[in-house]
Image (spheres, coloured by chain):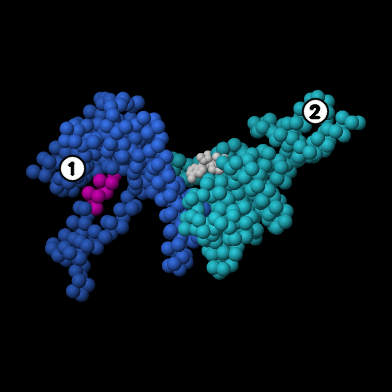
Amino acid sequence: MPIKFEKVSHIYSDGSPFTYTALKEIDLEIIEGKMTAIIGATGSGKSTLVQHLNALLLPTSGKVEVLDRIIASDEKPTKLKSLRKNVGLVFQFPEYQLFEETIIKDVAFGPKNFEFSEEEAIAKAKKALAMVDIDPSYYDKSPLDLSGGQKRRVAIAGILAMDPKVIVLDEPTAGLDPQGAKAIMELFKKLNKEYNKTIIIVSHDMEHVFNYCDDVVVLDHGNVRCHLSVDQFFKDSNWCEQLHIIPPFIIQAKELLKNRGIEITKDIKTVDELAEEIAKKVIK
Amino acid sequence: MGSFTLGKYLPLNSCIHKLDPRAKIIAMLIVLIAIFIPAGWLGYGLIALAVISLIFMAKLSLKFVIKAMKPMLFMMVFLLVINILVVKSGTIILSIGSFAIYTDAIIQTLYIVVRLVLMIMITTALTATTKPLDLTLGIEDLLKPFARFKVPSHEIAMLISIALRFIPDLIEETQRIMKAQTSRGVDLKEGKLKEKVMAILSLIVPLFVSAFQRAEDLANAMEARGYAPGATRTRYKVLKMERNDYILLVVSFVLCIALIILAIL
Ligand SMILES: Nc1ncnc2c1ncn2[C@@H]1O[C@H](COP(=O)(O)OP(=O)(O)OP(=O)(O)O)[C@@H](O)[C@H]1O
Ligand SMILES: [Mg+2]
């Protein structure tokens, strides 16, 4: 069951002088079980696009198909709770949604809303907090007393605790330290690989896209510019050039090596692999 | 929120938009006074004519202005009900058993409604054509003469402009938090009372937290740039009255005088 956008347009403040078309007849099919990156310049419509996935925004025209639910422009959807349970959306700067007295209660808030009992919700919260590396000694602290990065992780745990099938993340690593960002990305990769979650992630960080994602969707002024596998996308150096993206380190290194006469054709992701390939070429 | 138009600025290009905010504020005050002069329907007709031509000149659509009245609809209905229950003079137009509706009740309500509608129209015409910041500049200047009575005109204007400045931000913030909590299963429409209380709490707490945060950030930013209340400072935008501004003042003044004459006759 893929996630499908069919001719989806979204117009903000339709019919007023402030009207703005953020999505223009988008056709898109995101494959289940993959980790898909959504990239594009600021204002290209990424946040708008992902908010259609759990019907926070409804298409102005066209339809969205997510997990057997069809959300079309011409009908007001009802009973969205099961959709929202199964599609967890973590907003850009989610730390602003924390409100409970204690961290554990805040993380349990989601599962409790989805009809889990108090104990079940707490158990799920503990599991989710462990996943994002929040130490049990913090559980009874106020979420407002945490650092920015910790708040972010608690907020992400708040969504993970709902155990959604599809996890959508809007720039989850913005403002995190590199170590913390890496840990979070690795967590998503693990959720994707081991728990078979579909992950959709909005990101500006090409290293993350390159290292962790399977597919990439490029948005440009409300249009889908391309939808390719990550390897294909970065192999064709035209894309990065056209979109004014600085390619990931490994791709840059490959390019530089190629200019010096060492061409590496194999798809590689890490520095170690690169070193190995260079060694092979040089020793030969 | 998108349909809430009362007090919203509309960036259009019209001669009314270009007027000096001070002239517009004074003209509005004069017309507001005129609305309260009991000059009968002819008087209201005159004001309505003036206000509608003003709205037309400002390139505002009537639809926009009518939308601004929506929040007042409830109040108008409420007034009608009260008047029907209280006013017992004039002739009876409808009677059900011992309960009767009198003509005066209807006429009085109509008077009030017409006044309200005119007032909303004129204030909407002001706020829709004047940037909030210009509005506060105008208020500041108009309050200047009261400085000798220790009225802190600059501080009042600064307060108003900060408040106005943050309204859209707070609306946006509310929507964002609402969306975030909706994603966590909050349902603001359905659910039991306890769930609803929780839902509202999940909205208000983050909103307050971020509002205080913003206030603190703003205070720090202002202080870092050397802001001190009461200090003399120059202005980036200097207001200047021009021919059209005087025309507006004269027209509204003449309108007011005409109503007084009508009322006396
Ligand atoms: N509530 C709104 N009302 C009107 N216009 C909006 C609203 N939200 C977003 N927009 C506009 O829609 C466009 C797309 O916004 P969106 O938030 O989807 O961009 P984005 O790709 O997520 O950008 P960023 O990388 O900065 O997060 C922007 O030009 C923005 O100005
Ligand atoms: Mg965004």
User: x, y (%) of residue A91?
Assistant: 55, 49
Q: Is residue B98 above or below residue A6?
A: below
**Residue at 24% across / 59% down in the picture?**
B79
Kindly report the secondary structure that dominates the magenta region of the rendered protein.
Answer: helix
Name the tint of chain B in the rendering.
blue
**Residue at 43% across / 58% down in the picture?**
B201
User: x, y (%) of residue B146?
Assistant: 18, 34
The quadrant in which residue A138 appears is bottom right
**Residue named by callout 2:** A258
User: x, y (%) of residue B53?
Assistant: 28, 38
B162 or A50: which is nearer to us?
Answer: B162
A82 or A183: which is nearer to us?
Answer: A183
B250 or B187: which is nearer to us?
Answer: B187
> Mark 2 belongs to which subunit?
A
**Residue named by callout 1:** B33
- Over which residues does the magenta segment extend? B113-121
**Kind of residue indicated by mark 2:** Lys
Magenta highlight on residue B116: yes
> Mark 1 belongs to which subunit?
B
Instruction: Report the residue that reaches farthest toward the left.
Output: B265
The quadrant in which residue A55 appears is bottom right
Q: Is residue A38 above or below residue A254?
A: below
Q: Can marks 2 and 1 be said to lie on one chain?
A: no
Q: Is residue B95 visible?
A: yes
Question: From the image, which quarter does the C terminus of chain B lie in?
Answer: top left
B257 or B2: which is nearer to us?
Answer: B2
Give the label, 2 or 1, closer to the camera. Answer: 2
